[in-house]
Amino acid sequence: MGTPSRAGRYRIDRLLGSGGFAAVWLGHDEDLDAPVAVKILAEHWTQREDVRERFVQEARLLRRVDSHRLVQVHDIGELDDGRPYFVMTYADRGNLEERLASGALPLDEALRLAGEIAQGVQDLHERGIVHRDLKPSNVLIRATSAKGGTGERIMLSDLGIARTEDRLSSLTLPAGSPGYMAPEQTQIDGAPDQRSDVYGLGALTYHLLTGEPPGEERCPPSEVEPAIPPAVDRVVLRALEHDRDARWPTAAAFAAALDRLNSKIDTDPPTGAAAAPDRRRRPGRRTLLAAGSAVAAAGVAAVAAFPTLGDGDGEGRASDAANAGTDPRGRWLRTDADIPAQYRTLIVQAGTSCKVEGLSPALIAAILKVESGFDPKLSDPGMNEYGIARWTPRMLMHWQPGGLGNPEPRPAQITPELSIPAIGRYLCYWGKDLADAPGDPALNLAAAYRTSAKMVRESLGVPEKHQAYMARVANLIEMYEPADRSGDPP
């Protein structure tokens, strides 16, 4: 199989992003002389009929909605080797995750974008579809020609774990992205509905306003950015209610509330004495730079689109573009460490995916080093552990992007693209149970990954039999974490 040169009539130019289930390529429609995004199912999933069907179903759903607020599907087919693909709108301005890398957006822009996203979600709901994975990387941006200048439009992407109305009453498994999914999405048979997407919209809006997703305590956005008016707090916090009956009833209702806000409040930046220091934009908690804006040409099967990850042998070089977008100034990880370049973006994303004390990219890198020495092909059948993070297939099924909504991977399918994000998801979920555990929070998290959060709590910290393991992790964290996180790396 390998790198395709064509997909039907479309020339394949270069890889835009890849995930555990699919890759997205920049293509060219030679008949119309226009760029397109071509999404191709990963070759190791080609023989799984359930995965193939879900892949094709995503294209059908996008085509069914056929809204300019969603990525539009133009064609579908199979490569000569049998891999299915579909052709989509190319997002030449990247995604919201990239735009938020430098922090919160101005108040008027944040409210306007949130309203447009909510309208796109309403387009889905009117056709009986619940997205279930609203997050910044799944909101793409495309340049448009407008009278008097060039504008932009947003497009929702990645319906890989979407549910249609006829299936909402059937058994549902945990699925979504930490920080953005509604409480009911974390439960088996939580029966997510349109109000689950309203929660996701609230979390996205919170991120746009403050530069970071809401924590579990869901404090008002104004506690993070004091310039945010109380009326905005009320609208956003209603969307984030634990009780779905207390949320805005529809995405359209949320969009209307945002529109009323944006028409009434003063969104001009303060000047003079009113421009207090605490009203300035502050950088977001997560500075995740992607490999150019084109990385986000389309969502990749319930995971964010990642830069080129090399050939997967643990020694291949990532492209110059990928290296340029992977923490180039060493803000999160030392640039002179032995962390393979092709995994740095995945590690930074996993280590900054939520607010849990002790979680960091350096911790994720240290765990991977101790577990496998960064070997993506590690195989230990005796322990039934595989890949760069030593996951067992059954355990990884719970924590892979998309959660139990995706099939249990076979050992050969346990790639870094699945394994590394899964560590972040696991630690984000269980880390809250370790808030009061004595000892170093980072080492407690590492111990929970090696054993369980329950064992760490019962042992009042790192269990004795894992002390040597944790000593290695502690040394590696010190090696990998820049001494000065506020400026240039050492």
Image: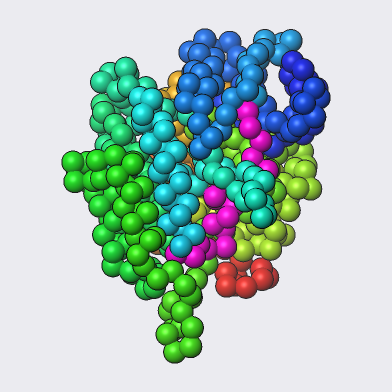
In percent of width and height, residue 34 lies at: 76, 32
Q: 426 or 205: which is nearer to us?
A: 205
| Magenta stretch encompasses residue 99 | yes
The tally of labels here is 0
> Eyeballing the image, is 63 above or below 435?
above
Asked if residue 301 lies left or right of residue 326, the reply is left
The picture quadrant where one finds residue 403 is: top left
Residue at the far front in the pictured view = 147
* x and y, in percent, of residue 138 in the image: 51, 40
| Residue at left offset 80%, top offset 29% | 33
Which of these two is toward me, 48 or 69?
Answer: 69
Residue 57 among magenta residues: no
Relative to residue 436, is residue 149 drawn left or right? right
Residue 167 x/y as whole percent: 32, 18
Residue 49 vertical placement versus 2 (above, below): above
Residue 380 occupies which quadrant of the picture? top right
